[in-house]
Image (tube, helix red, strand yellow):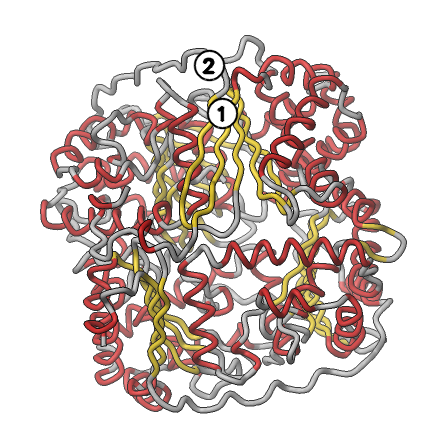
Amino acid sequence: MFVDAWRTFAPLCGLLALASITPAWAAPKIESWETGNGARVLFVTAPDLPILDIRLAFDAGSARDGERSGLAALTSAMLSQGAGEWDANALAERLESVGASLGTGSQRDMAFVSLRTLTEKEPMDTALDTLAAVVAEPRFDQADFDRVRENTLVGLRQDEQDPGTVGTKALYRAIFGDHPYAADPGGTLESVGKLGRERLVEHHRRYYVARNAVVAMVGALTRDEAEAVAERVTAGLAPGERAPSPPPVPEPREARRVEIDFPSSQTHIYVGQPGMQRDDPDYFPLYVGNHILGGNGLVSLLMDEVREKRGLSYSVYSYFLPMAQRGPFLMGLQTKNDQAELARGVLMDTLTRFRDRGPTEQELAAAIKNITGGFPLRIASNAKIVEYLAMIGFYRLPLDYLDVFTERVSAVTAEDIRDAFRRRLDPKRFVTVIVGPREGQVAEAR
Amino acid sequence: MKRILTALGLLMPLLAVASAEVQEAVLDNGLKVLVKTDRRAPIVTSQVWYKVGSSYEHGGITGVSHVLEHMMFKGTEKLAPGEFSRIIAENGGDENAFTGRDYTAYFQTLAKDRLEVAFELEAERMRHLLLPEEEFLKELEVVKEERRMRTEDDPEALTSEQFDATAYEASPYRIPVIGWATDLEHMEVRDLRDWYRKWYAPNNATLVVVGDVDPPEVFALARKHFGPLASEPVAEPKPRQEPDQRGEKRIRVKAPAKEPYLIMGYKATALGHSTEDWEPYAIEMLVSVLDGGASSRFSRELVRESRIAASAGAGYSPFARLPEMLVLEGTPAKGHGVEDLENAFLEQVERVRNELVDERELARIRTQLVAAKVYERDSVYAQALQLGLLESLGLGWPLADEYIEHLSRVTPEQIREVARKYLVPDGLTVAVLDPQPMDDKKRRPPATGGLKHVR
């Protein structure tokens, strides 16, 4: 990119950046059906540009790893390293010679394969056939597997250089304990070092199946063409079975503080506890409430108290990450070492005050205006819409989800937010992770 | 033109899809306004680009462009600190700003009927910024935290910063955008006042609007809000030309880390600086041969085949105000040291100096370029970014549609020629991150963490 220094970080909560509707602009019309082998399809036609975006979402994330942490992520990384009749080199060349781009990724719930291609016949045919092979017939060649695993280990060691990554990994472990969400999707040096290729083959065979898949598509296709494309990219998938729900997340027991010694000039502070599910009854009050607390970039209570009033941190945020089971609520900031406790105090005071008092009517009105007024932005590109489709399909949200979103947001009251925050967040049971130089600080910090 | 058509062949019609008409107007006070209509969604993005950035700075005040960018949100004659962002938020807008070596830019994306809100606010802060001392002191602390986060505590970023400062001597590209720690420590609000007065004027700015709008209406709105602003004499920055490098430079950067990292840079050229206009384009095509996707030479040969690199990249942009470097960087794979990776990069360099690039490689890159240009149309923000960038560099916005044709015209012979001319040992700078133990108490930054103590 050309950009060297941004004024702020957008909090890393893509799925949270949910849309809402102003009456003037309708949400995109979502069409949905099943493929012959049972994959669920969500499609929006976008005829203006000769582009097709596809996102295949499988319930195949790290929540399925069990003892083999990192398995889902490594499986996902191997999909593009050779499939069907093409080895890794041939596969890359096929896609790039028609200008297509392929992406793979694996989170806790979802593993996905995304494709963007031109819709001219020849490039699109090549891209679609390649995609079909990538999801159904990955080769998992031993030599490629060895290479990808070794390079994954290099990446995991690089993670250990970064205080932010060290801190968030520790936070998830502390919040989720024995639950599958505790482990980082990337796995650990130990667990990845022990993985063998046959485990990947098994993982793929079990979870990359049609009934466990959602096909999200946005592009310059008619409904008939879209149906044919959906059949074509899923053709090689066995029908299979949908994966069972992950186990419920246990209640937090007591407050915990994890301190990690790290040779950095800043101390990173993370605070969290189990938050909400994707289909949570408290979804809207928590979403709108968090928007006010620390969800809305430059304008939030946390930004105001921590950065604008006191200059303590460059980035400060809070978010709920709704997942199949309760994902985390988390807050984070980073500040120079000698003011870490001061910043932590401001963070916790701001949260506690908001939990006790809820938002003012003014704050609530401003947040609703921001969310509803910004709706057209959030569905302004094919790239954004296809992500919504995958999310809606994956979490089995109603197809009118985007249509009713503004109404639901606008209906939230200050009392709803106060009530939901008081019931759902318990200040006595937060996990706090502190990453920074610890010598000479521990006694004082406690 | 004939040659271009041959090179792009069947891709030409797609390129036509990707381009759209840009309308230009210049207000009496010198503000250039560019408008591109895109009716795919009922939104609009508005960006104000100033021709100033870290490459305009000098020792003692480095980082001042970026600190000023932060202060642009901190109050004007009519707006209280933070009010700018609150108003944009209440209007459902998305906003931010960024500072680079050659530009500082501010943007808002909004529903199309809110464009005037953005104009009113941007016009106000173009000439009426207050820069209150107490707000400055707080925001300076925020910027110091930003520097700690981005640079001090990131060993690769630290290596990259020292690499630039070593490679460039007279060129201001040696200055980190965020500024040196000591210059931030001693920055004063009057440094910002001087900087603001010097560069923030309509005749040193470009307003770019892309979205569901009618150009005549946008021009009328621009005249209404920006028209009354006074222009200012703006001096051209001095050339500060980089002297010829007379031999390889090499540094090691020791920092707590787990994995080494290698950066190798060759002094190159930029548009408007080269003896032949095609040279920068040939260098960019060369970089694409090395690192243009998963089928490029680095991915194929260094990562997948020889397995010397865990990751390997090449970078260069012809779009810069001053000549940049062609940079190769990467992390060795297990069982290999940085020396192996360096040798592998040098072998790759030798090959492009000696052998002609395969025509099929170029054909694939051309297709990728055209596809990327079509994909860019999915984002009004990305389209505005291109126009604002080219205009701010003094290259002119029409290049946004033309540069793919320039790139497509590049021949294998031209690539070999720029490789022979620029990829020479005497123009090379090498930086190696030398990982130090993470738990060595003696090497730590002090727990008090004041920036002045950080080395």
Which disc, if any, is residue B429? 1
**In the rendered image of this protein, does residue B76 appear above or below residue A203?**
above
Q: Is residue B90 something one can see in this rendering?
A: no
Nearer the N terminus, badge 2 or badge 1? 2
Secondary element under disc 1, as helix, strand or loop, is strand
Residue closer to the observer: A211 or A249: A249
Label 2: how many residues lie within 10 Å, few (<14), some (14-19) or many (20+)?
A: some
Residue at mark 2 shares a chain with residue at mark 1: yes
Q: Position of residue B78 (x, y in %)?
A: 14, 48
How far is mark 2 from mark 1, CA to CA? 9 Å
Secondary element under disc 2, as helix, strand or loop, is loop
Q: Which residue is mark 2?
A: B245
Q: Amino acid at mark 2?
A: Gln
Chain bearing tag 1 is B
Q: Quadrant of residue A282?
A: bottom left
Q: Position of residue B344 (x, y in %)?
A: 67, 32
* Quadrant including the C terminus of chain A: bottom left
**In the rendered image of this protein, does residue B361 appear above or below residue A314?**
above
Residue closer to the observer: B328 or A26: B328
Q: Is residue A146 left or right of residue A6?
A: right
Q: Position of residue B164 (x, y in %)?
A: 41, 30
Number of dots carrying numbers: 2
Instruction: Please report the residue visible at 90 percent of the width from the left and 53 percent of the height from the top.
Output: A85
Q: Is residue A129 left or right of residue A245?
A: right
Q: Position of residue B39 (x, y in %)?
A: 54, 48
**In the rendered image of this protein, does residue B349 appear above or below residue A376?**
above
Q: Is residue A278 left or right of residue B54?
A: right
Q: Is residue B429 something one can see in this rendering?
A: yes
Q: Is residue B183 left or right of residue A184?
A: left
